[in-house]
Amino acid sequence: MDSATLSIISSAFGVLAPALFVLLFIWVWWRTESRHVLFYRLWQLVHGSKEISDPEVKAFIDEQTSLMSFRFVTGVRVKSLKDAQALIQWTRRNDIDMGAISLCGEYFDPDQRQVLVKKLPSKPMQGAKLLLAGSAVVAAYMSMLGIYNDYAVLKFKDSGRSFLASTEQARALSFGVVAIQKSSCSNDKQAIPPKTEFSEQETQVICKFLNEEASQIFIKKTVSEQRQSFGLLLIAMAWVAWSSLRAWLSGKLALRLARRKFDPDPSDRQLNLDLSAR
């Protein structure tokens, strides 16, 4: 590894490290819905890790830190530490996993310890979520195929018809067709294979295009640009699939909780939540 490469890596790390640090704080802020952790750590960075002298202020800071720790670890956004403690007792008494409460998301009120029945999704809505997730998975798979594809999608200027072209061959956008090879483009018309779905004029255009030096550079550039687009589409579709599946799971768990009709009182009798029940 030469000095130039090391310099590039060092420069990239110098930019990425602060950016990742900022993104980490933004993520913590989003998950806890509070700037307490950020400001408290900044205060410790400036002032040091000395203990807070005032007992009332110290108790308040400790309470907020405990609350933010609960929110961050569990993903359940209770309003106060008292609500967090009540929720812990309630889940223990009813043998409910805290992760299930977190996954219920907007359908569960953690402070009141009850399902928001009026917000529960309908069966058609749940089905739509699964359909969207499935469509996104298919689109993500197609995007992945596009990333590894060596063909550029091009169009004829006159007809506007699309076709696939690589540096060595071109083929129509159909299954079972024969590609026109660069090596078969000659004055001998018999060298062109049948069943290409290209007209004689289109075949001439393709042969001329494949044999031009500038076309080779153009195809490679187009393939590179298309791969970048497919990469972005893959990321977007993966996010849509994950979000849709999570939304579906939230609704499914909330509906199960609602059917069990748990008493919100944390000191009430124990009931078991069977997450595998239909």
Image: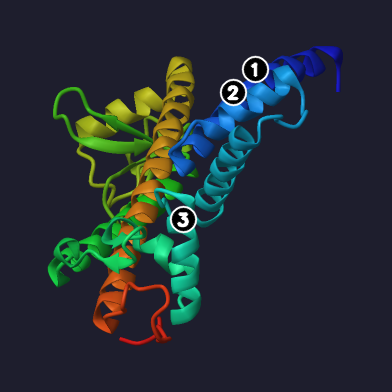
Residue 242: give x, y in percent of width and height: 39, 54
* Residue situated in front as seen by the camera: 14 or 262: 262
- Under tag 3, what secondary structure? helix
- Amino acid at the residue labelled 3: Lys
The residue lying furthest to the right in this view is 2
- Under tag 2, what secondary structure? helix
Q: Residue at x 26, y 51 (%)?
A: 174
Mark linked to residue 82: 3
Instruction: Give the alpha-carbon distance from disc 3 to disc 2, as whole Å.
Output: 35 Å
Residue 41 visible to the viewer: yes
Q: Do callouts 2 and 1 mark residues in contact (Cβ within 8 Å)?
A: yes
Q: Earlier in the sequence, mark 3 or mark 2?
A: 2
Residue 184 visible to the viewer: no
- Under tag 1, what secondary structure? helix
* Residue situated in front as seen by the camera: 28 or 46: 46
Mark linked to residue 19: 2
Instruction: Give the alpha-carbon distance from disc 3 to disc 1, as whole Å.
Output: 42 Å
Residue 244: give x, y in percent of width and height: 31, 56
Mark linked to residue 15: 1
- Amino acid at the residue labelled 2: Ala
Residue 38: give x, y in percent of width and height: 57, 29
Q: Residue at x 22, y 28 (%)?
A: 156
